[in-house]
Amino acid sequence: MLKKILAVLAVAFLLGACEDAPPPAQAAAPAMRNFLVFFDFDRSTLTPRAAAIVKEAAAVAKAGQNARVTCTGHTDTAGPANYNMALSLRRANTVKDALVREGVAATSIAVVGRGEGVLLVQTKDGVREPQNRRVEIVIQ
């Protein structure tokens, strides 16, 4: 009788050892967050509302481990294309500088200028459209 009990226990142990181990937990894909900061016409200075949005974005970036941040500047179609490209870069760098002042590592921030190339609101050339004067902050 003892042999039968030991045999059953041995079989149960061996079967348990042969079961597949549960798959390792996969790390969740990092959440991507977007923020939009709008600018006044022909300006690259932050409005109080824009500064508040940058502060919120900085808090999200600092909460993430090894967060990567991209600041992409845009303009409306008023003015020459080369001027707008430079303005979009100034805007993106203004946002980067504000993020750094809020404690985000400068090395984790990429700056891109798109000028009038990627409009949020499609307009004809020469149109002043407030929604197009922006910096998009993407945090990954």
Image (cartoon, grey):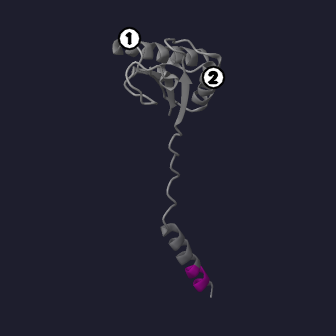
Badge number at residue 58: none
Residue corresponding to mark 1: 83
Residue 63 x %, y % = 61, 31
Secondary structure type for disc 2: helix
Residue 117: percent from left, percent from top: 37, 25
Q: Residues within 10 Å of mark 1 (few under 14, many from 20)?
A: some
Residue 94 within the segment the image draws in magenta: no
Magenta residues, dominant SS class: helix
* Range of magenta residues: 3-8
As drawn, 116 above or below 33: above
What amino acid is at disc 1? Tyr
Q: Residue at x 55, y 22 (%)?
A: 38
Residue shown at 61%/25% (left/top)? 53
Residue designated by label 2: 55
Could you tell me residue 21's position as x and y percent?
A: 50, 61
Classify mark 1: helix, strand or loop: helix
